Amino acid sequence: MSDVQAAEWTRDPRLVPIVNLIKRSMRNEEQQVVDRTDCFGLFVIEGEGECSEAPKCALAAHCRTAYDMARAAGGIIIQPVPQTTDPRAPEPPAAYAKPLKNRWATTGKYMRRGYEDLGRPVDLFLAEFRRTIGELPQMPPVWHASNYATQFSHRGQYQAASTASYHTVMRDGVIIVRFWTNAAKQALVDIPPELVDPLIRVSDRLGQFRYNTREVLQLEAPVKIPDKCWPKTRPCTHRVVVRTQLAAYETAKAVRTHWKF
């Protein structure tokens, strides 16, 4: 596991074999997100219905698949299996734990872990990206697109949201850039079509730098995200790879320049 505390699904005998099977078809960064996501596989919760976060969750399609497979196998996932406390799995620090669903707010279960700066290169890249983007209103850990206009739009046209695995900038509630922090030495950044041409030019201008014994691009030019990933990456269609702080700065600058904020 990539995290100190194993996610709740790893203690659920209904989900473990199914999730492990699904993970075989995932990219490494997606597997790391699953390993940090306590609610994975609980796509339907008794008394609440389908997960309200599905429209903006990068794992929604996989989560629903896990739920459907478990239900088809006879282990309908509508509520968590009662668990005993595992002394080998300490609770995450309170500063990085946020309640995912109000139903569990007082139980300590299904807590959303926030971002933690671990001093990795990717953390330096993110710090530069956020500094260049500037201060933006921060969305709460849990929100739903259907409530955006009434509950959050008054805070400004541009807002930011953060999780343990990625940071996003939104315009009118729609993501315009998603900065992943799963890999230690580089950052994957999902972008919409509007940023493809500007970042191709940035990649050419920045060129290469020496990394260990070889020359690599500071900013890997945009490549199209496979169509099968659309449910997880929408509305972003392309992805760049950031390998230096300068590349992080230029990526954030491209965002601000195009949308003029």
Image (tube, rainbow, N blue to C red):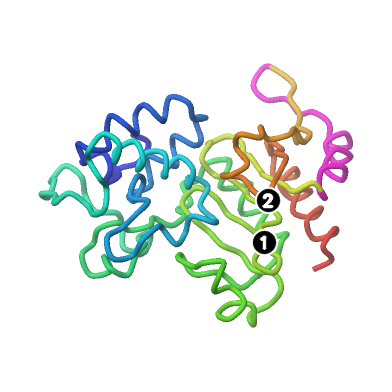
Q: Residue pushed farthest left? A: 84
Pick the quarter of the image with the C terminus.
bottom right
Label 1 element class:
strand
Residue pointed to by mark 1: 174
Q: Which numbered circle lies on residue 235?
A: 2
Q: Is residue 66 left or right of residue 12?
A: right
Q: Are marks 1 and 2 in contact (CB under 8 Å)?
A: yes
**Prevalent SS, magenta region:** helix
Image coordinates for residue 229, horizontal then vertical, percent: 60, 37
Image coordinates for residue 22, horizontal then vertical, percent: 41, 30
Image coordinates for residue 190, horizontal then vertical, percent: 67, 44
Give, as a single range, the part of the protein colored magenta: 194-213
Q: Which is nearer the eye, 105 or 82?
A: 82
Residue 206 lies in the magenta stretch? yes
Residue appearing at x 48%, y 26% in the figure: 25
Give the vertical position of 242 relative to 26 (above or below): below
Q: Which is nearer the eye, 241 or 119?
A: 241
Q: Is residue 109 left or right of residue 254?
A: left
Q: Amino acid at mark 2?
A: Pro
Q: Amino acid at mark 1?
A: Val
Q: Which numbered circle lies on residue 101?
A: none
Residue appearing at x 22%, y 38% in the figure: 74
Image coordinates for residue 203, horizontal then vertical, percent: 83, 36
Pick the quarter of the image with the N terminus.
top left
Label 2 element class:
loop
Give the vertical position of 7 relative to 176 (above or below): above
Q: Tell how many labels.
A: 2
| Precedes in sequence: disc 1 or disc 2 | 1
